[in-house]
Image: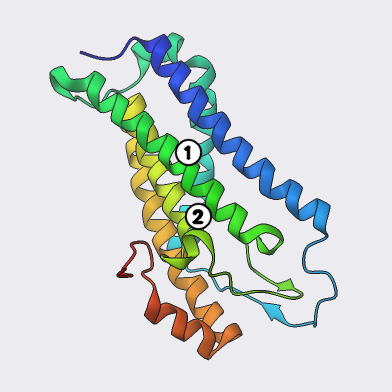
Amino acid sequence: MDMEPGVAQLLAGIGFFSFVFDFTYVLAIKRRNKPNGGGNGSQLVVNHSLLARIGIVVLDVMICLCCVMVFTFRYVHPLVPRVWAGEGAAVVQVVGFTLVAGGDVVLFLAYRALGVYWAYPLDGKTGKHKLVKEGPYKYVRHPVYDSFGIIAIGFVLLFLDWFLLVLCVVSVAGLYAQAIDEEKALVAYFGDDYASYMRETGRFFSRRRS
């Protein structure tokens, strides 16, 4: 049995506006602290593959659709192509909200660690860059992409929407491709420092041992 649409919409709103807060937070830090001031003229350039570019566009579409659903789900609920989750649908939706909330926390921690060094996209960014190894970056190389993937999966489970499921699969594949493309650029930019960092951390899952 599904969760009552109004409750699902409320939970989605909490998760989505937490995501917006994270994004606003890192933008405010950059603006207040004049990021990359006094650059050395060196460029950090990423050559994105076709899959990465498609994934970026699809992820943007999914974010926009989730925003619309936050405000309209209780009304469009009967029209949504539903993913069947059996009698435990409400439990699945609670798990979805938990993933969204957890992803928001990971995203905040990653943005806090990046601070003024956050940049998206990386293409052609000129200035001083730092290899951040604090916070979640101590364990994985792409916690921001981890959080995006977790949040995307969470919204799929919360709304149980087939269309969101398709967008999520393409988005996650695109994030994986984008991470690989960025790692090539970061190795070229930071050299042995980044190569060593790669040996110490996992791409998306930690492999550090206490």
Q: Which mark is residue 62?
A: 1
Quadrant showing the C terminus? bottom left
Mark found first going from the N terminus, 1 or 2: 1
* Residue 121 image position (x, y, % from top left): 63, 61
Q: Please name the residue that numbered disc 2 is placed on.
A: 144
Residue type at mark 1? Answer: Met
Q: Is residue 150 left or right of residue 35?
A: left
In the rendering, at what x and y percent does residue 201 appear?
A: 39, 72
Q: Is residue 115 above or below residue 185?
A: above
Per the image, label 2 sits on a secondary structure element best described as helix
Side (left or right) of 138 relative to 154: right
Residue sitting nearer the eye, 11 or 180:
11
Find the residue positioned furthest to the front. 210
**Three-letter code, disc 2:** Val
* Image location of residue 78, percent across then percent down: 34, 11
Horizontal and vertical percent position of residue 46: 58, 73
How dense is the environment of label 2, judged by Cα within 10 Å: few (below 14), some, or many (20 and up)? Answer: many
The residue at 75%/46% (across/down) is: 28
Look at the image and tell me whether residue 133 can be seen. Answer: yes
In the image, residue 99 sits, relative to residue 208, either above or below, namely: above
